[in-house]
Image (spheres, rainbow, N blue to C red):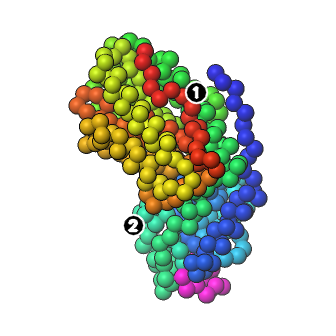
Amino acid sequence: MANIKTPEPISEQDYLARIQRARELMGKSGYDALIIFGYSAIAGNIRYIANYRPFDLSLFTMPGYMPNATILLSREGEPTIFVPTWFIPEAKERGSWMDVQSMEIFEDFIREFRSKNNLKKVGIDGWDTIPVSLWELYTKAFSGVELEKTKIVEELRMIKSDKELAWQELAARITVEGMKTAIENIKEGVTERKIARAAELAMLEMDAEDLSFQTVVMSGPYTEHVVRRPTERCIEPGDLVLLDIGARTRMGYCSDMARTVGYRVLKDKEKLLEIVAEANRRGQEAVKPGVPAGDIDKAVRGYITEMGYGKNFPQSGYHGMGIEFAEHFPPTTLLKPGMVFNVLSAVFITGAGARIENNTLVTQMGRRVLTDYPLYKLL
């Protein structure tokens, strides 16, 4: 297994610089304060500011202990993060620059905060994932204040610093090693679950903090699905095997890599693999500074449609990457150096399917693929 060097950690000063940039954007928007929300599945905004990732929602369902987090960022002074009481020690340890409070005192805290600050307009970031009950709590606590939906922190996350890119590349390298391990385990009679566990163990042993998402291994007729959990189905000759895996690093940066393997397949499935591979190559060629992100999808989709499979490509040809394995970059977003995308191509037909995903960095001269590995394999 490859020996991979750990990059320089993202420091407290780096987090404080992010907070300052957020405040500058708050000023331009006329916000007196900013509320930032996140939960376990979509925690990028919280981790970007506080280096804290809420626990998995499935672990705690008691009232008052839903493991989400809220940050209150004012125009000056120490930012405050509100978490369930059980998680206060971890939040303090991970973000010493933050004031950490229990979510149980949120209303009382905001009441006192408002008594000291004349709030007229407050931005809400992460608004599209806030539970109804928490949204009601926010509106009650800030009654009489104009609340405006915003994407300030998401915008800051779009362009990565050199330190961030080092961690992004580490996630990609770990995932490539996981992919190699998964493919080495594709043999007749081996189950999808065993292949998935082999890939996961390889990534975790290389010091991944966690998986980016639940590992996908689909074989044979199951590859007609866009996504499916691994099963006890055994690999058979003639199978396509779709692998979609990802690692999360200790600084939070994620990878998302997909490859499809042909296991003793006939020419018709080889052709399907080559179509999906060529579509991905064309998507890669579309990645360059100054072009709209939507051009990546146009390139991928255009070729797949030309080959007669346009209706069999239900996904987008790209998505952003960073602290979350899938970050939203609108199609009109102009590509800039430091942005990281996943170029995605796929075709799903009755009884068979293939997907390829490549992590790609926008550079000054064009692009650089971070998940450098053959687009498909024939075994």
| Quarter of the figure with the C terminus | top left
Could you tell which of marks 1 and 2 lies nearer the N-terminus? 2
Q: Was residue 120 drawn as part of the magenta stretch in this picture? A: yes
Front residue of this view, candidates 262 and 178: 262
Residue 326: x and y, percent? 48, 48
Q: In the image, what residue occupies the spot 52% across and 59% down?
A: 334
Secondary structure found at label 2 = helix
Nearer the camera: disc 1 or disc 2? 1
Magenta span: 109-121
Frontmost residue, 134 versus 75:
75
Label of residue 215 in the image: none
Q: Secondary structure at mark 1?
A: helix
Horizontally, residue 89 falls left or right of residue 264, namely: right
* Amino acid marked by disc 1: Glu
Q: Give residue 135's quadrant in the image.
A: bottom left
| Residue drawn where x is 50% and y is 84% of the image | 145
Relative side of 100 to 350, left or right: right
Left or right placement of residue 198 versus residue 187 in this view: right
Kindly identify the residue that appears in the image at 37 percent across and 27 percent down.
273
Amino acid type for the residue under numbered disc 2: Val
Q: Position of residue 274 (x, y in %)?
A: 38, 28
* Contact? badges 1 and 2 (CB < 8 Å): no
Residue 2 screen position, x and y as percent: 66, 24
- The answer to whether 195 appears left or right of 49 in the picture is left
Between the residue at mark 1 and the residue at mark 2, the CA separation in whole angstroms equals 41 Å
Q: Which residue is mark 1?
A: 177
> Mark 2 highlights which residue?
132
Judge whether residue 239 can be spotted in this image. yes
156 versus 150 height, above or below: above
